[in-house]
Image: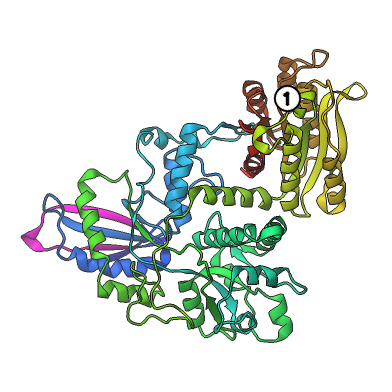
Amino acid sequence: MTTIAVVGGFLTLVVLQRRGSSCEGELRLNVAAAPEIAAAVEPAAQAWAKTATGPNNQCVSVDVVSAEPVDVAAAIATAHGVPMREIGQADGKTKLPDVWIPDSSTWIQRLQAAAAKAKAGKGETVTPAPGQATASANPQAAALANKPLVPEKGTSVGRSPVVLAVPEPLAATLGWPKKQVTWPKLLQTMNQGTPMRVGIVEPTRNAAGLSGLLAMAGAAQASGAKAQENTVAALRALVKGKSALTADLLAEYPKDTDPATLATKLGAAPLPEFAVVSYNANEPPVRLAAIYMEPSPLGLDYPYTILPTMAPEKSSTANGLLAALHGDEYANALAKAGLRASDGKTGAGFSAPTGAPASIAADKPADVVSIIKSLTTWSAVTAPSRMLAIIDVSGSMGQLVPTAGGATREQVTVEAAKGGLALFDDDWSVGLWTFSTFLDGNKDYKQLAPIAPIASQRNKLLAALSGIRPKEGGATGLYDTVLAGYREVKKGWAPGRINSMVILTDGENQDSDGISLDTLLTTLRKEADPNKPIQVIAIGISEDASKAELEKITKVTGGGVFIAKDPAQIGDIFLQAIALRAQ
């Protein structure tokens, strides 16, 4: 017997086979599958359930739910009390399944990384702004505290390579289908006189978007002398062309071959092969070419993932369903959805795009460090922001950093700030201060640039950064500076933007003539407005920075403390800290 029900807005197929006296009772297996593969999993589950029995001779029922991977990932993370700030809290509608089939193993890697980070701390402490709830307030989290979020890996039950989807007339100008299109060629086309419009589905929430981000960023970083320039250009292009949903991105492609239209509409985007197959099946006025880039982006592998929260008695049944997701019938069902089998080959009825390989090899597991770094950078530069950056120029900032080729703490900090500024879009508003003691008359801080749109003062900010030098004999006037900076951000607080203060320091307060820590904290408590939150992000440059002191401050304001134990790593820490403001 098969019934269909709508649960929480999702179409749920309940496969329930009763076999008279051959089985007793019921064992229900809940499966959440990415939408495009759910249609293939369903008939395979139905066929399998006709003869399957549970470990105690129960009848088996299977609920196959079509669920976006980002929603299931958020539900898993929220249930365990593990923050995944880039995807947000669970929607409250998506339930934890027994088996999860996301579109990519990168979801598993990201959940594992988030859990490891939450457990280890990673030198980072995060405090919510006044009135803001914490993820750990979830009562379910305590019960799941000792259970892993996900297993080490799942077993692939389908594949779809990620291709560069380009309108066929434009693809022909790149040499398609006769010539192999390379990443350097694409970067050149993106940046030449009349640049090609490039789009991407939000990579923090979409596996194919993440794959494209990794591939394009990796190619830019490997482009020799122009690596930094190409990386910045690629990220800016992707940010401008990002869409929340795949459907929204597909709607941006041209609807006719007029040269003016082709020049102004979307010209390229990393998308799954199945999305191109589906798009062309609707006979659009301008078909999309699926360009199989070299090196190929990380493909979608649809890992069959048995969650550790599943009841132990369901284990053998879940493994039985996994064994059923193979064979010719299942491969043919995948083909109808534009998907390949787990071995990379295609079943009957697959509408192969021009130039598509008959088979694709399995990808090596993605480097989780690269995944997290790319997503951190993306989050850092995409959130609309208003920020005051305050850099320590006390005498100790002149100390040499052995791991940075003999550069000083000040120099590595300034270079990190310059790198961030290069990525920030023109609609950001940024101000720049320095601080020590008696830096501007009796004040411990000095304004180098007011908080204003980068579009009007990018060169001014770069010039000011280049001129920063440590003050010989200068001490660290931390408390007076934090209060003044907080008030400066509050004075021009802007709705619809992330208002923040980022302070970079290598020491603790040394100004005996300034306010005390108790006075600072009391004043901040009085002035903090839950309706106008201001994130205070403190970055400690080396372990000389007082983490305990900085944590007391951010506990009042909300924000976070990051310690770069090795100052040479300040660039990565800076991007992690900037990304926190989006939460």
Q: Which residue shows up at 44% across the image and 63% down it?
A: 300
Q: Which residue shows up at 43% across the image and 44% down it?
A: 112
* Residue interval drawn in magenta: 13-31
Q: Which residue shows up at 52% across the image and 66% down it?
A: 295
Residue 127 spot, x, y in % from top left = 60, 31
Above or below, 182 against 551 in this view is below
Residue 440 spot, x, y in % from top left = 91, 27
Q: Give the amino acid at mark 1.
A: Leu
Q: Which residue shows up at 56% across the image and 74% down it?
A: 165
* 199 inside magenta stretch: no
Q: Nearer the viewer, residue 152 or 72?
A: 152
Locate the N terminus by quadrant. Answer: bottom left
SS at badge 1: helix
Residue at the limit of the structure toward the top, as seen here: 512
Residue 560 appears in the picture as rendered = no
Mark 1, residues whose alpha carbon is within 10 Å: few (<14), some, or many (≥20)?
A: some
Q: Nearer the viewer, residue 493 or 92?
A: 493
* 20 inside magenta stretch: yes
